[in-house]
């Protein structure tokens, strides 16, 4: 079964995030990247990233090719030994850097646009934190075929 253009973009993002390692020049090593929301509920490894897919909007005025905007949120969870806020900022910068390495998502997108981000801090026995970063991937498909890009 062939993958849609949107699926190819999502697979590229997952691979991109999995490549965040100190050996590759980043400040952190991502332990796991999830696309399955159920699997993400049982976090055991940190930093962990959950790719939450939102809307896939189309341009209603398009004639021969569909101009699309795939919206998603990357939810990054960490459990640092100290300096929770500083650790969140460090992993956020790593994710931002990685997402801009290939804004065309393996030649499947026109552009990758970062939107807003927000923090969540959980101060318990073991402090945890999360940051959510929104992204929009602009891409094109044939109107009649979400598996094919226009010529």
Image (spheres, grey):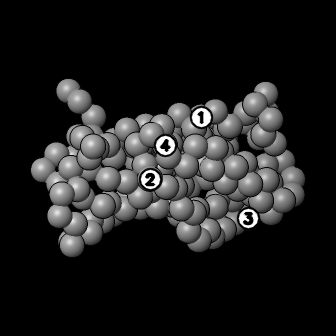
Crowding at dot 3, Cα within 10 Å, few <14 / some 14-19 / many 20+, comes out as few
Q: Position of residue 38 (x, y in %)?
A: 39, 45
User: In the picture provided, is 109 more to the left or to the right than 112?
Assistant: left
Q: Is there a contact, CB below 8 Å, between mark 3 and mark 1?
A: no
**Observer-nearest of 47 and 8:** 8
Q: Mark 3 = which residue?
A: 123
Crowding at dot 2, Cα within 10 Å, few <14 / some 14-19 / many 20+, comes out as some
Q: Mark 4 = which residue?
A: 105
- In front: label 4 or label 1: 4
Q: Mark 1 = which residue?
A: 18
Q: Position of residue 3 (x, y in %)?
A: 27, 34
- In front: label 2 or label 1: 2
Q: Secondary structure at mark 1?
A: helix
Spatial CA span between label 4 and label 1: 14 Å
User: In the picture provided, is 11 more to the left or to the right than 80?
Assistant: left
Q: Residue at x 59, y 34 (%)?
A: 18
Q: Position of residue 50 (x, y in %)?
A: 51, 48
Q: Is there a contact, CB below 8 Å, between mark 2 and mark 1?
A: no
Q: Secondary structure at mark 3?
A: loop
Q: Mark 2 = which residue?
A: 110
Spatial CA span between label 3 and label 1: 27 Å
Mark 4 or mark 3, earlier in chain: 4
Spatial CA span between label 2 and label 1: 22 Å
């Amino acid at each position: 079964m062939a993958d849609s253009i949107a699926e190819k973009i999502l697979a590229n993002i997952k691979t991109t995030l999995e490549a965040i390692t100190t050996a590759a020049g980043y400040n952190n090593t991502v332990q796991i990247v999830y696309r399955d929301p159920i699997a993400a509920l049982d976090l055991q490894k940190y930093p962990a990233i959950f790719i939450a897919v939102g809307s896939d909007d189309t341009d209603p005025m398009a004639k021969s090719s569909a101009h699309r905007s795939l919206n998603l949120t990357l939810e990054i969870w960490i459990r640092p030994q100290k300096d929770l806020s500083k650790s969140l900022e460090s992993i956020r910068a790593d994710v931002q850097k990685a997402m801009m390495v290939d804004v065309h998502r393996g030649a499947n997108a026109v552009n990758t646009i970062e939107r807003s981000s927000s923090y969540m801090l959980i101060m318990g026995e073991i402090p945890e934190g999360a940051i959510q970063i929104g992204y929009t991937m602009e891409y094109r498909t044939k109107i009649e075929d979400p598996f094919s890009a226009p010529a």
